[in-house]
Image (tube, grey):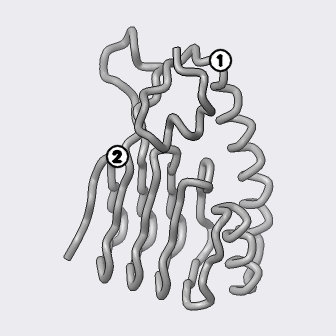
Amino acid sequence: MNRSDIFERLKNGEIIPGNDPQGYKMREASYNTKTLLIQMNNSSDPAEIRGLLSRITDCVIDESVAVFTPLYINYGKHTQIGKNVFINFNCTFLDLGGIIIDDNVLIGPNVSILSEGHPISPENRHSLVPKPIHIKRNVWIGAGATILQGVTIKR
């Protein structure tokens, strides 16, 4: 079994078995992210929201980005957000497989961007299958859309 860091393996698209000895790290990271999300989702100050999102993603979120909270993210460190991006209310990002949002993207309310999933077979269902999502420049994702792992959206 590969013993490299579980987050590197996820970013590289490796399937993580349900009994992976580093699996607990995903839960710990998610709880750490949740602490910052609670602060972010209770703020109405755009600069504070961007600052907390920068901490969640471990990347500087440009001042041209607008996020209408609440926003839900399970990890954060595998999400990249470009400039002049608008994210509307009540979106969910599962980013263990990686999410890239390029410049000038509009994301409607209640959108789910899910870069991870599970095998269909019951005996393997506890495994995690990560595949990156890339939303290219100038894309508009309408309200209620669900973007699944491995998808690239372009104009």
Pick the front one: 112 or 96: 96
Q: How far apart are marks 2 and 1 (CA)?
A: 24 Å
In percent of width and height, residue 109 lies at: 45, 71
Amino acid bearing label 2? Gln
Q: Name the residue under label 1.
A: 21
Residue 31 is left or right of residue 71, and the answer is right
| Identity of the residue furthest to the left in this view | 155
Write the residue at 42% across / 47% down. 115
x and y, in percent, of residue 140 in the image: 31, 78
Task: Mark 2 and mark 1 in contact? Answer it, CB < 8 Å.
Answer: no
Q: Mark 2 points at which residue?
A: 149
Measuring 62% from the left and 78% from the top, which residue is drawn there?
A: 61
Q: Position of residue 91 (x, y in %)?
A: 50, 63
For the C terminus, the quadrant is bottom left
Residue sticking out furthest to the bottom = 64
Of the residues tagged 2 and 1, which is closer to the observer?
1
Q: Measuring 54% from the left and 65% from the top, which residue is drawn there?
A: 90
* Relative to 42, 106 lies left or right: left
Q: Which mark is residue 88?
A: none
Using a 10 Å C-alpha cutoff, classify the residue at mark 1 as few (fewer than 14 neighbours), some (14 to 19) or many (20 or more): few
Task: Tell me: residue 117, above or below residue 70.
Answer: above
Residue closer to the observer: 73 or 84: 84
The answer to whether residue 45 is left or right of residue 137 is: right
100, above or below 66, in the image:
above
Amino acid marked by disc 1? Pro
Q: Which is nearer the N-term, disc 2 or disc 1? A: 1
On the image, the x and y values in percent for residue 7 come to 59, 39
SS at mark 1 in the image: loop
| Mark 2 crowd level (few <14, some 14–19, many ≥20, 10 Å Cα) | many
Q: Is residue 111 above or below residue 65?
A: above
Q: Which residue is drawn at 61% across and 56% down?
A: 76
- SS class of the residue under badge 2? loop
